[in-house]
Image (tube, coloured by chain):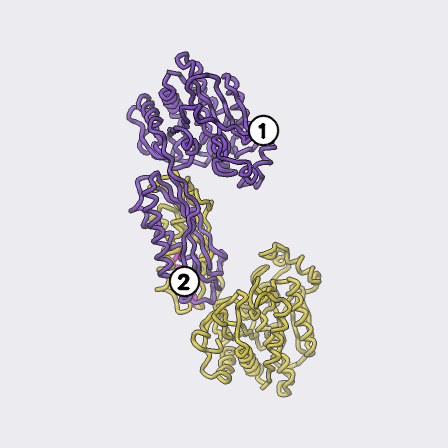
Chain colours: A yellow, B purple
């Protein structure tokens, strides 16, 4: 079996971190100078192992092997959320890079190859999986023309031009070239750690449904309007939020999550009774049947609030992403590798977060594996995974790659 | 008794409305060109009746009579909230202007006078009752230096200079000059209308207490964080809001009001579990004992939330205005006038909103009367009062003035 070099994996991850340090993590938003530096670092490393390497017109990095036998596509992303962790993204890229090196160095796999991809903007600074969607041909130029950085407001076209990528063509993969796509990632939750497990065999990436719940009352003076005649849209929204919190658990699955991350009152002044409120509800599960049950319940809660008054209440779905199933033979390969390396310490689990594998799974067999996140912390600079677990994960990854290439 | 001219009262109010029309109301923010035009209109009208008239350095208008006998100060304000009603303020100024004319025209009152004041910025575009507080000597120059328009951000000094008032001295009244201050205003609520009454005899202006309630949880990823380990500050804040709504009514007085006009979640993104939330609670009552009871209850609710978890919860008082009692003999004068003009159709009531009379009451005997607001609507351009009620209110006002001047 191809052998990975654990010290090199750690050194590569530390080198990437050193290009964009922030506290104990990194600050590497999409197309920032720090991000572009990381793309160039990867391009150099890929060339060093003899891959054809390029940064394409949407800042995806591709490393393409020159072998004629079975090839696997591996990778993840290099940019980070603002002021976030050093492993969210780079871990999967470095595992794929190391797997490419290991496969190349193993005479048994002389005819096989691992192509490497770093997909731009998985973290959504400019849009919604623009890099991986471009790589599979799902993005047209107009979408990029309209994309702006959610923090700075800078158009993606300007940022690409600043990175020297204006006019550079975008590379679209041929899914038939590959046995499939394999992505490693930190779990970003605490399930593995809490259960003393080492590898999550991803079964699916959860479906996401998002709703805006609106209450409409009557805006009025907070001093002169009697309580008896008030129609306070803020109180109505708070009651709906509490009803959701109280009634969802009985209908949810073991891993269902739901979040009300935004409540907006209008006009939002201390001395004005809110005339209108918005509550954003997002829920995630790998099983559409569970999401259907919860959707039924929230629609019932909102309809009851509307009926009982004093405010009107309505709900509108604003986002729906279907659950993305991982390929069973990819799951078998990851599970088999994990059982060999960390016997009994792996678990089949869905991914609660979206990943580029979700996009690739629409075009070719895809799989994912998770390594533990310390304390389940994610999207924060304190995000971390032990060195031992990072190296352990790389071994499981290359073992799974070897099984999938089947040399 | 001095006689008012109802048609002239309506014509004056319509003239002021015509200087700043917006839909069926007005848009006359403090120190806007429309507001300054209304000040000049008043100055002209005051000069026409022989008063010494001036617009002072904080854009207060004073009309000062030249008589040597008993004098009453009457008035209110001329600026409006943004896109608001035509009577909130001007009604009280025009009543005082008409009372000044009527007293002057009545030989029985030859030695008496009504001074008129239009206090700048009662509506709080730049601060907190800056005009009336300046008139009683409670405002120093530094306060004006720091004041900025809450909508435009323009410094008050710049706006005063644009109005031609840079360097103009501010006029401070001598409370001993007056028997007291009498202000008429629209009710801004629906109590009079709902009870088929015509005049509210204001007993006091309510005290206001305001609090910021804070919940602190743990911000985390909305997809990967299990429900069981979440500390969602948004849900915690919603539960506190519902508890306040449910538990306050049993402790409140008949006219107590409370409002949660602002809820802020941090970071406020659909896919992030809120790590921190703020809820602003404001409550008003004429009786400090009632406010003490409610304050005790909300502190208990917050302490219980903090104790039961999973989030920390705390509360901080951010504003406290004491209830301002109207002078008993002013209440007697208004009540007697109302009983004479609209027998049995008046009621003693507190004012739920703040008014300039609150400021004047700290320095001399003060009183207020309310006329009905159609539908209780206020701070909106649909605010209105019937012509008949406007004229009725002017009659009660002059009758009360006559009783207070006691010629």
Q: Secondary structure at mark 1?
A: loop
Residue behind mark 1: B168
Q: Quadrant of residue A67?
A: bottom right
Distance of label 1 from label 2 (alpha carbons)? 69 Å
Q: Quick check: B150 above or below A195?
A: above
For disc 1, the chain is B
- Near-viewer residue (B28 or B354): B354
Quarter-wise, where is residue A299 in the image?
bottom left
Q: Residue at horizontal 39%, vertical 13%?
A: B108
- Total label count? 2
Position of residue B136 measured from the top left corner of the image (x, y, whole percent): 47, 31
Tell me the quadrant of the picture where the N terminus of chain B can be found.
Answer: top left
Q: Is residue B304 above or below residue A219?
A: below
Q: Which residues are magenta?
A: A287-300
Numbered circle sitting on residue A292 = 2
From the viewer's perspective, tell me whether residue A43 is left or right of residue B377.
right
Q: Nearer the viewer, residue A385 or A399?
A: A385
Of all chains, the one bearing label 2 is A
Point out the image quarter for the C terminus of chain B: top left
Question: In this rendering, would A156 be left or right of A294?
Answer: right
Front-most of residues A266 and B99: B99
At a point 49% along the width and 68% down the height, the residue shown is A377
Nearest to viewer (mark 1 / mark 2): 1
Where does residue B241 sit, x and y in percent of width and height? Answer: 38, 52
Q: Is residue B204 magenta?
A: no
């Amino acid at each position: 079996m191809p052998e990975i070099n654990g010290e090199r994996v750690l050194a590569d991850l530390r080198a990437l971190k050193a290009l964009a340090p922030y506290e104990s993590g990194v600050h590497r938003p999409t197309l920032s100078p720090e991000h572009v530096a990381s793309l160039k670092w990867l391009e150099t490393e890929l060339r060093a192992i003899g891959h054809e390497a390029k940064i394409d017109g949407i800042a995806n990095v591709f490393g393409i092997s020159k072998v004629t036998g079975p090839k696997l596509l591996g990778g993840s992303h290099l940019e980070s959320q603002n002021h976030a962790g050093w492993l969210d993204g780079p871990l999967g890229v470095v595992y794929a890079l190391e797997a490419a090196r290991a496969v190349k160095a193993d005479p048994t796999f002389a005819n096989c190859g691992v192509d490497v991809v770093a997909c731009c903007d998985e973290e959504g600074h400019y849009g919604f999986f623009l890099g991986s969607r471009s790589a599979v041909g799902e993005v047209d130029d107009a979408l990029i023309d309209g994309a702006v950085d959610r923090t700075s407001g800078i158009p993606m076209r300007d940022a690409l031009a600043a990175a020297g990528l204006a006019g550079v063509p975008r590379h679209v993969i041929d899914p038939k070239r590959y046995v499939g796509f394999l992505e490693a990632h930190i779990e970003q939750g605490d399930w593995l750690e809490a259960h003393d497990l080492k590898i999550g065999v991803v079964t699916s990436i959860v479906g996401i449904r998002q709703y805006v719940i609106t209450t409409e009352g009557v805006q009025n003076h907070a001093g002169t309007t009697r309580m008896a005649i008030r129609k306070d849209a803020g109180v109505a929204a708070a009651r709906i939020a509490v009803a959701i919190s109280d009634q969802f658990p009985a209908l949810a699955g073991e891993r269902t999550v739901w979040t009300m991350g935004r409540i907006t009152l209008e006009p939002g002044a201390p001395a004005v009774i809110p005339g209108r409120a918005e509550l954003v509800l997002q829920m995630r599960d790998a099983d559409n049947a569970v999401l259907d049950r919860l959707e039924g319940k929230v629609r019932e809660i909102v309809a009851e609030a509307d009926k009982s008054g004093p405010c009107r209440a309505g709900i509108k779905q604003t986002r729906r992403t279907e659950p993305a199933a991982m390929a069973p033979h990819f799951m078998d390969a990851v599970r088999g590798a994990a059982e060999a390396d960390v016997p009994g310490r792996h678990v089949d689990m869905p991914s609660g977060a979206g990943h580029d594998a979700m996009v690739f799974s629409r075009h070719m067999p895809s799989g994912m594996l998770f390594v533990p996140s310390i304390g389940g912390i994610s999207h924060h600079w304190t995000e971390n995974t032990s060195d031992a677990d990072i190296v352990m994960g790389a071994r499981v990854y290359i073992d799974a790659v070897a099984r999938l290439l089947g040399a």
